[in-house]
Image (spheres, rainbow, N blue to C red):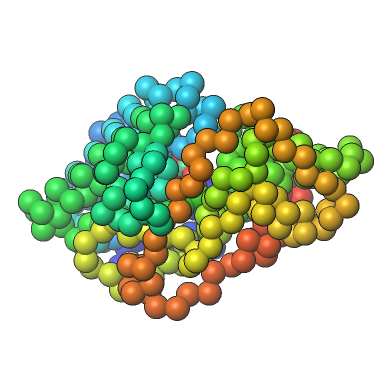
Amino acid sequence: MRLLVTGGSGLVGHAMQKICPDAIYVSSKDYDLTKEKDVNAMFERHKPTRVIHLAAKVGGIRDNIDHPAEFVYQNVLMNSYVVHYAYKYKVEKLIATLSNCAYPDVAKKYPLKEEQFHDGPPATTNFSYAYAKRTLDVQIKSYRKQHDCNFFSVIPCNMYGPYDNFDEKQSHFVAALIRKIHKTRENKEKTLNLLGSGKPLRQYLFSEDFARILIMLLDKYDGNGPINIAPKDENPSIAEIAKIALKAINAKDINIKFDKSFPDGQFRKDIDTEKLQKIIGPFSFTTLKDGIRKTYEWYLKSNLTY
Ligand SMILES: NC(=O)c1ccc[n+]([C@@H]2O[C@H](COP(=O)([O-])OP(=O)(O)OC[C@H]3O[C@@H](n4cnc5c(N)ncnc54)[C@H](OP(=O)(O)O)[C@@H]3O)[C@@H](O)[C@H]2O)c1
């Protein structure tokens, strides 16, 4: 088996390298996947039998709001070429990565089931990214139907872990939270200021758990996707996550203050994991406390300037 992983330099790519060091990992420095000739060259050179397609233009809310054209253009091109060339080069199995951000902004029923993926418009804040992911879902299903390709997709919830993006302008919630707690402590302050009410609910998955699950699916699953991926029965509020983070990084003397004048964003987007549980059976998910502790240890070791 020759496993090729796109997006090998990202948050999930690094977790995959730890779990599965023998695979071939590529990033934009090796091939620009928005360029057809690069995608062709990648398949020609590596001739993979299996592909995990992680590469994407990913960003926080601000980045999504400011650059919607880049999000749709780059993601649609990358996905279209990678899936099409995987078909042309007769890849035996491909897993593509969608996102729970692409589910409808508001749904009638929660937790969200896979069949609700296209049931209404996604949040306006990441409309372009979400539609690119929905298009990837359509593409995967179409190649499966017309060409009988053993391709399927997964829908992870929000993720965090070592190698996450801690940059102030681009980071997602957990990385931003870790950075803010660290800076609060460094500045000998006692109050952690967070934006919004703290009430929205958010599922979080440790990137190494996701990598392990991807390898299990690669071995065990040949059916139709997509498959939701999130820790079982967990949907903490932002306030609860912040409290867990303070404990995880031993900063219990810091108080949290929420600035309710800032908007909250989506109240909930939790996904149902019954399908995943049936496929992989019992799985021991990393607790938020342990995952945040490991991520903080990595952050400290990395000597990041932000
Ligand atoms: N992080 C989350 O919370 C989350 C949640 C749900 C779904 N997902 C999905 O999970 C997958 C992995 O996410 P991640 O957080 O690991 O992303 P990430 O850390 O932002 O990494 C993105 C990866 O894609 C590569 N890439 C971007 N543009 C490229 C291009 N034009 N050509 C080739 N490679 C390119 C990057 O390479 P360079 O480093 O060279 O730029 C990097 O390796 C993505 O599909 C994402 O949409 C992520």
* Quadrant position of residue 181: top right
- Residue sitting at x 72%, y 38%: 258
On screen, residue 127 versus residue 289, left or right, reads left
* Residue situated in front as seen by the camera: 279 or 272: 272
Examine the rendered structure and indicate whether residue 245 appears above or below residue 127.
below
- Which residue corresponds to the image point at 33% horizontal and 74% vertical from the top-left? 278
The residue shown at (85%, 48%) is 254
Q: Is residue 161 above or below residue 37?
A: below
Check the image and name the residue furthest to the left.
146
Q: Quadrant of the C terminus?
A: top right
Asked where in the image residue 196 lies, by quadrant, the reply is top right
- Residue nearest the viewer, comparing 274 with 164: 274
The furthest residue to the front: 108
Instruction: Quarter of the image for the N terminus: give it.
Output: bottom left
| Residue 77 place in picture, x, y as percent | 28, 33
The answer to whether one can see residue 152 in this image is yes
Left or right relative to 219: residue 290: right
Q: Is residue 288 left or right of residue 153?
A: right
* Residue 31, visible in the rendered structure: no
Give 274 or 229, whichever is nearer the viewer. Answer: 274
| Residue positioned most to the right | 188
Q: Left or right of 118: which side holds 162?
A: right
Q: Residue 64 location in percent, x, y? A: 47, 28
Residue 143 lies, in percent from the top left, at 14, 50
Residue drawn at x 69%, y 44% as measured from the top left: 177
| Ligand 1 image position (quadrant) | top left
Quadrant location of residue 134?
top left
Looking at the image, which is closer to me, 288 or 75?
Answer: 288
Count of labels in the image: 0
Q: Position of residue 206 (x, y in %)?
A: 56, 59
